[in-house]
Structures are given as C-alpha cells and as structure tokens.
Image: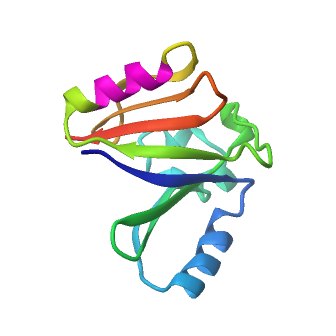
Amino acid sequence: MATVSSYLNFNGNTEEAFNFYKSVFGGEFTVLQRFKDNPEGGKMSAADQEKIMHVSLQIGQGSVLMATDALESMGQKFVPGKNFHLAIMAESEEEANKLFNGLSADGKITVPLQKSSWGALFGMFTDKFGIQWMVNYAY
C-alpha cells in the first residue's frame, strides 16, 4: 500500500527551514539535491542553481518531511497557505496510475503522470476539493 508524506514549498529558504526542522526532530537528510544537480540546472541563474530542488528528512518511523524552493524563473509562484502537497509514494506503477487517475478525476492536472528526470514515474494535480497532490513511483 502507498505511503503519504508532506511536501512543502518555500520561497528560497528551504535550506534554512530544513536545518531548523532537523535541529528539532533530529536525524539526517536522506536526500539533499540542489537545482544545479539536475540535468537542466546549467540553464539556470547561479542563484537558482544553489536553491534546493529536493530535500527529505526522515521523522520517526515511516514519516518523511520533504520540500523544494519554488522558483519564479520556472513559473512557480509561492503562495502562503497553498505551499504544500500531499506526496504519495506508490509501491507499483499500477498503483501509481490508479491513485493518480482516481484522485485527479474532476481536478486539475499540473504535471501529467510520466517518467521524470530522476528515474521515477511522477505527476502532480489539484483534486476537485482543492487539495494538492504528488504521486511518485520509484522504479
């Protein structure tokens, strides 16, 4: 069965926020990736290259807090109160498709479910109730 975690968006201060969360919760970052580490990173400004593309912090048993910096240069807009997604980690490609198609019905798909640059099946949408979701299946 899939797991659900919180995915936060920050206005350029993800690193500061996650160092704070780490100081409170303890643990280590399981992933810390900057935009410069992405294959398209070289096309970005030097400042944007240093921003956080993805960070994960394990919290207790089975909970993961994840985040990214929202970049205006990529058309992303930071809106307080709408700066989070529920992130589903599917256990199979079939489950990812089922959950994505089911939850996005009558909603708005922002990123179709497709293979990503990090080697996963990934998609994003807002459901018909206004809740923002991400679905990810790591091959």
Quadrant holding the N terminus: top left
Q: Quadrant of residue 67?
A: bottom right
Residue 42 shown left or right of residue 117 in the figure: right
Residue at left 60%, top 59%?
50
- Residue 134's place in the image compared with 99, above or below, is below
Query: Residue 75: x percent and y percent?
Result: 70, 30
**Chief secondary structure of the magenta span?**
helix
Residue 13 shown left or right of residue 27 in the figure: right
Residue at left 59%, top 36%?
132
Query: Residue 128: x percent and y percent?
Result: 61, 21
Depth check: give the residue in front, 79 or 102. 102
- Residue 105's place in the image compared with 67, above or below, is above
Residue at left 52%, top 54%?
6
Write down the region rendered in magenta.
96-104
Residue 43 shown left or right of residue 56 in the figure: right
Residue 98 falls within the magenta-colored stretch: yes
Q: Quadrant of residue 138?
A: top left
Query: Residue 73: x percent and y percent?
Result: 71, 37
Q: Quadrant of residue 115?
A: top left
Residue at left 52%, top 45%?
86
Depth check: give the residue in front, 94 or 19. 94
Query: Residue 24: x percent and y percent?
Result: 59, 85
Quadrant holding the C terminus: top left
